[in-house]
Structure formats: C-alpha cells, structure tokens
Image (cartoon, rainbow, N blue to C red):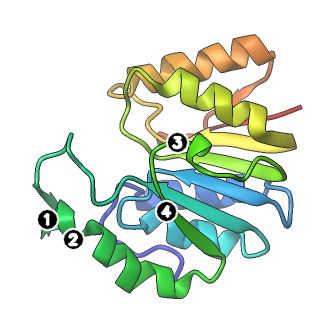
Amino acid sequence: MVFDENIPGWLNVNEVNSLKEICSLVPNNSNVIQVGVFAGRDTLLLSHELSSCTIYAIDPWPDYRLLKDLQVQNGRRLRLSDVQKIFQKEVLPKCANVQTVQGMFPADLNIKENIGMCYFDTWADSNEYNLYSVAWDLLLKGGILCGRSFSYWGINVITAVRRIGREKNVCIHLPPGNSLWYIIKK
C-alpha cells in the first residue's frame, strides 16, 4: 500500500495523486532528499513511486524539542519519542530504497550530485528560503524542488517559494485542492 492513514503524518488523501504526479517528473535513477519524515507517511509513497531512486530521509528524530510531547493523529495518542520507532517498524521495512539520516538539512548529507528531487515536509519557520536555496543548487537540470505547507498557515513557505520562483525565473506549480507546490529546475 502506498498511502496508509494509520501511519501518523499530515499527507492527506487529497494530496496523494498530486504527489504521485510530482514524482512522475523526477529523473529516473536519481537521488531524492526528503526533509521532514516524521513517522514516514510521505516516505512510503515516495519509495513506491520513485522505486528507481535512492531516497535520503532526513528527520531530527527523536529530537522534537519544539513540539509538544503528545499529539493525537487519527485518534491515535502519539508520544513523539515513539515516532522514530513507528517509522522503523511500520515504514522502513517496506522501503528498500530509503536511507535514513538524523538531521534537519540537505547539508547534513554528503550527497552532492545526481539530486533529482528535494521534498520538504517541514514545519513552516523563518529558515525556509535558505533551505530551498541550498536544495536548488544541489538539483540536477530537470530536478524538482517541492514540498507541502503552501497554505494560510505556511506564510514563510509561500514567501520563500515565491522568492525562489522570482530569483530563478521559474514557474511555481500549485496542484489544486491541497498545500503541495513544486518548481522544476531549467
């Protein structure tokens, strides 16, 4: 199964087809960087859709200092200290092409070439523009810079994405009905 609502996360059923469409644009056999894995709901879909790619899944687990210790996801009480365990037990065994990295940024990787996609599913903060700029420079020609949170509560994401679009003179794509966005590097 490529989308599992039982895995904690924020990717919703309305975004699944849009993320699959974005994945179809990623160059085959490239490296993919996912920043913001949490429990791996998005990772599961990325792994299935990008089976010819190596996915580097970056997350700070279990270091969630900025979040409350307890959240409720789909009626499931979730201790953030258990998020990495959920990922390792319920997601990672289904994802042969995924390598995990504890960290927060693409710079936490030693991978600097053949990057076909950088996908950000992060909390919106003032750092987004810098993250996206670094990721943009890593992308192959034809690579995809993309993410979530292009919505009213992600004003820093919106500002950063628009700035990248202006500076690089590229079109920002916003699939209808969700908070996903993507930009293709010319």
**Considering only order in the chain, which callout, 4 or 2, is on the residue closer to the N terminus?**
4
Image quarter of residue 126: top left
CB within 8 Å, label 2 to label 1: yes
In the rendered structure, which amino acid carries the disc numbered 1?
Arg
Viewer-closest of 176 and 29? 29
Element type where label 3 sits in the image: loop
Residue 87 coordinates in the image, percent (x, y): 38, 74
In the rendered structure, which amino acid carries the disc numbered 2?
Asp
Name the disc covering residue 82, or none: 2
In the rendered structure, which amino acid carries the disc numbered 4?
Asp
Element type where label 1 sits in the image: strand
Q: Residue furthest front?
A: 110
> Which residue lies under the disc numbered 4?
42
> Which residue lies under the disc numbered 1?
79
> Which residue lies under the disc numbered 3?
105
**Considering only order in the chain, which callout, 2 or 3, is on the residue closer to the N terminus?**
2
Residues under labels 3 and 2: Cα distance? 22 Å
2 vs 4, front mark: 2
